[in-house]
Amino acid sequence: MTITITAFERSPDGGKGLARDTRVRWALEETGQPYDVRLVSFQAMKEPAHLRVHPFGQIPTFEDGDLALFETGSIVFHLAEQHAGLLPADANARARAITWMFAAVNTIEPPILELSIAKFQEGDKPWAKDRLPLVQDRIRERLRRLSARLGESEWLDGAFSAGDLMMVSVLLRVRPSGLLDEFPTLAAYVARGEARPAYQRAFAAQLAINAA
Ligand SMILES: N[C@@H](CCC(=O)N[C@@H](CS)C(=O)NCC(=O)O)C(=O)O
């Protein structure tokens, strides 16, 4: 049975790898799992067939036999549990890597998401100009502390793990704002993630669809 994920028929970023199917593709590549992709339009995502798999009408989804999942954190965690390469064998190290996965989606990603909402969905509101710097500062505060924790280390906790995969993926989404480059330690960390052959394959696969 082949794994099938969903991705945008046309990603709003035009193939810069910021749509969240990229992190799932990356995990599939790191763990050596072949997969198919079902492309969906914005309209199809809100129709019953897709809503049966993704209750919020979003991408990506993951289907493998009779298992259907949504939420990238859960999908990457599932892959990391099923296959070698993304979680350490030592129980404590494994728990710490999982903690970083949660930190990525629960602590770092929310203010980054807030920034795109402030810019693209609420940019025309009368209070938008006052709100933007507040959101940017909330991101800076998170990045400052993450950068301090990473320090001179290559990855967040020992060898590359699903925690790094999720963290790098989340940080990539803030790079277009210029905020990531204010933290050279984190910019270099993200570049290390992007240099991994598995990331490159994932990136190229989503680009091929969007450039077509
Ligand atoms: N927390 C979800 C977020 C999923 C998400 O926001 N997906 C975006 C694409 S990156 C989407 O489908 N946006 C279209 C929409 O919400 O209508 C996850 O990590 O899987």
Image (cartoon, rainbow, N blue to C red):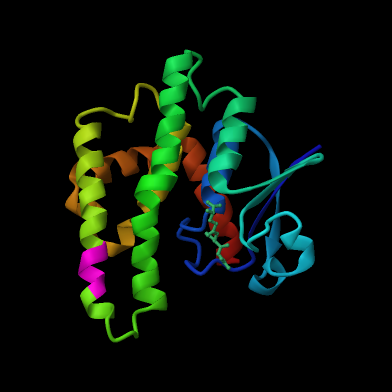
Say if residue 35 shows up in the picture.
yes
Residue 206, image x, y percentages: 56, 55
Please tell me whether residue 102 is drawn above or below residue 173 in the rendered image. above
- Residue interval drawn in magenta: 131-135
Main secondary structure found in the magenta portion: helix
The picture quadrant where one finds residue 156 is top left
Question: Outermost residue, top direction?
Answer: 90
What residue lies at 25% left-to-right and 33% top-to-bottom? 150
Please tell me whether residue 24 is drawn above or below residue 48 in the rendered image. above
Q: Confirm whether the magenta stretch covers residue 133.
A: yes
Residue 10, image x, y percentages: 59, 68
Q: Quadrant of the N terminus?
A: top right
Q: Confirm whether the magenta stretch covers residue 42.
A: no
What residue lies at 64% left-to-right and 66% top-to-bottom? 9
Residue 88, image x, y percentages: 48, 19
Residue 18, image x, y percentages: 46, 57
Question: Outermost residue, front direction?
Answer: 127
What residue lies at 63% left-to-right and 61% top-to-bottom? 56
Q: Is residue 40 left or right of residue 184?
A: right
**Displayed-image quarter of ligand 1:** bottom right
Say if residue 173 shows up in the picture.
no
Which residue is nearer to you in this view: 33 or 169?
Answer: 169
Q: Quadrant of the C terminus?
A: bottom right
- Number of disc labels: 0
Q: Is residue 3 left or right of residue 107?
A: right
